[in-house]
């Protein structure tokens, strides 16, 4: 029989216990196979107790989604001290890629799974994707600073930021969903998808290096 830890008494501690259990079960069994009842069983509570803290499973997913954005935001904010905006742009891409590799569970909730977006669509008070907008703003503001230095002058900062984000996100998504691994052996001379991901990121950096002075 699985040993259930002693039950915390503070509300925030109970919520953290629920979130940690949900994250564990989502990773082990997938979102669709994880129910409120299973989450409750994991921590020794009744399903009714879970509903005191979260409206439904999507509410729990969204809370984890926000937790992930808090972590990523902290890492990207630390890069704001990099004075050269072009070097900062490259560092943002590298940090974003590293976050995805080190936190695949959070990354899937934040950028791949549809459930957090469904939660936003149903909740009129949280209609905007605040986490995503904040990350996008980091990139846009860095592009604007690059343009003030004479780079990327032939384009909208919003579209240039979207292109940069999309390219790095695409690499992360292909890697985390094992698509990159499936092509690494037949199409590229790399031993594994990690090596291919690294080389692909270097190619992205080389691309923005070539295009930064196009006016």
Image (spheres, helix red, strand yellow):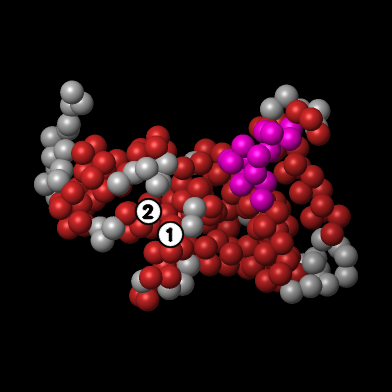
**Residue shown at the point (76%, 49%) measured from the top left:** 204
Q: How crowded is mark 2: few (under 14 residues within 10 Å), some or many (20 or more)?
A: many
Q: Mark 2 to mark 1: distance in Å?
A: 6 Å
**Residue shown at the point (35%, 38%) measured from the top left:** 24
Give the total number of marks visible in the rendering: 2
The quadrant the C terminus occupies is bottom right
Residue 205 appears left or right of 126: right
Residue 75 drawn at (x, y percent) = 51, 50
For label 2, the residue is: 61
**Residue shown at the point (64%, 67%) measured from the top left:** 140
Magenta residues (range): 170-184
Which tag, 2 or 1, sits closer to the chain's start? 2
Magenta residue check for 205: no
Magenta residue check for 171: yes
Q: Can residue 140 be seen in this view?
A: yes
The quadrant the N terminus occupies is top left
**Badge 2 vs badge 1, beta-carbon distance below 8 Å:** yes
Helix, strand, or loop for circle 2? helix
């Amino acid at each position: 029989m699985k040993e259930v830890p002693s039950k915390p008494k503070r509300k925030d501690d109970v919520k953290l216990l629920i979130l940690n259990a949900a994250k564990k079960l989502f990773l082990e069994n997938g979102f669709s196979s994880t129910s409120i009842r299973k989450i409750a069983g994991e921590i020794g509570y009744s399903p009714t107790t879970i509903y005191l803290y979260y409206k439904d499973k999507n509410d729990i997913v969204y809370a984890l989604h926000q937790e992930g954005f808090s972590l990523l935001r902290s890492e990207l904010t630390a890069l704001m001290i990099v004075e050269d905006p072009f070097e900062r742009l490259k560092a943002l891409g590298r940090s974003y890629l590293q976050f995805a590799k080190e936190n695949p569970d959070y990354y899937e909730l934040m950028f791949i799974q549809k459930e957090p977006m469904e939660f936003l669509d149903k909740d009129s008070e949280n209609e905007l994707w605040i986490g995503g907008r904040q990350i996008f703003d980091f990139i846009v503001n860095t592009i604007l600073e690059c343009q003030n230095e004479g780079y990327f002058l032939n384009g909208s900062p919003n579209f240039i930021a979207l292109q940069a984000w999309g390219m790095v996100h695409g690499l992360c998504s292909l890697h985390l969903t094992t698509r990159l691994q499936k092509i690494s052996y037949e199409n590229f001379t790399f031993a594994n998808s990690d090596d291919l991901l690294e080389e692909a990121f270097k190619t992205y950096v080389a691309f923005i290096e070539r295009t930064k002075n196009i006016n």
